[in-house]
Image (cartoon, grey):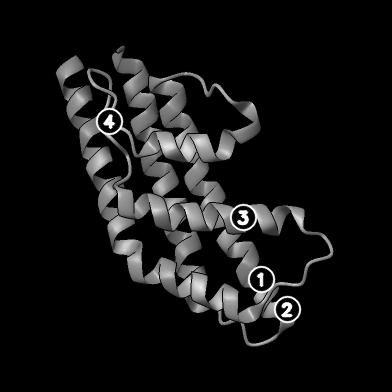
Amino acid sequence: MKKERLAVLLGYFESQLELIKRIRKEVESTQPTDREKTSHLGYLLHNLYCALEDLFQEVAKTFENRIEDLSRYHRELLQRMRLTIPGIRTNVLSEKSFLILDELRAFRHIFRHAYTYELDPERVRKLKLKVKRHWRLIRMDLNAFERFLQNALDKEI
C-alpha cells in the first residue's frame, strides 16, 4: 500500500472523527419533546450515520476499492467494516458496534425514504439512548482502527 493513500485516509479519518464528535454532541443535547424536536433529532441521527458511512466508504475505497452488490450497498459496506481482511487491514468495527450501527443505518433508511411517515418520538428517543449508551464501544473501535492506520503508515515511511 502506498504511504500517500494511507496518509490521505488517516487525515480524512481524523477530520471526519471531529465532525462525528460535533454531531454526536448535538444528538445528546437534543430532546424529542415535540414533533419539531423529534424531526430534528431524527435528522441528527441520520447525519451521524451518514458521517460514519462516509468514513467507511473511504476505508473501503482505500483498501478494497469496491462493493459488489450495489442494491445492498449500505448494508454491505457496514458488514464489510466488521471484517478483518487478512494481509490487507484489520476490522473497523466489533460485532457489538456493528449491531448498533446497523440499527442506526436502518433508521437512516426510514428517515430518508418515508416521506409520509411521522417519526415516533419514543422510537427516536430509544435509538438516541442506545447510541449514547454504546458510543464508547464505537469510539474505541474507531480509535483502534485509527491506530492501525498510523502504524501502517509508520511502516511505509
Circles 1 and 2: CB atoms closer than 8 Å: yes
Mark drawn on residue 108: 3
Which residue is denoted by mark 2 in the rendering?
36
Between 95 and 147, the one lying in front of the other is: 95
Mark drawn on residue 148: none
Please report whichever mark, 3 or 4, sits nearer to the chain's N-terminal start. 4
Instruction: Give the SS element for disc 2.
Output: helix
User: Which residue reaches farthest right?
Assistant: 116
Whole-Å distance between the Cαs marked 1 and 4?
36 Å
Please state which amino acid type lies under the numbered disc 4: Thr
Circles 3 and 2: CB atoms closer than 8 Å: no
Whole-Å distance between the Cαs marked 4 and 2?
41 Å
Between 129 and 55, the one lying in front of the other is: 129
Q: Quadrant of residue 70?
A: top right
Residue at the (41%, 22%) spot, across then down: 62
Which residue is denoted by mark 1 in the rendering?
40
* x, y percent for residue 95: 31, 49
Classify mark 2: residues with Cα within 10 Å, few (<14), some (14-19) or many (20+): few
Please report whichever mark, 1 or 3, sits nearer to the chain's N-terminal start. 1
* x, y percent for residue 145: 27, 39
Please report whichever mark, 3 or 2, sits nearer to the chain's N-terminal start. 2
Q: Quadrant of residue 64?
A: top left
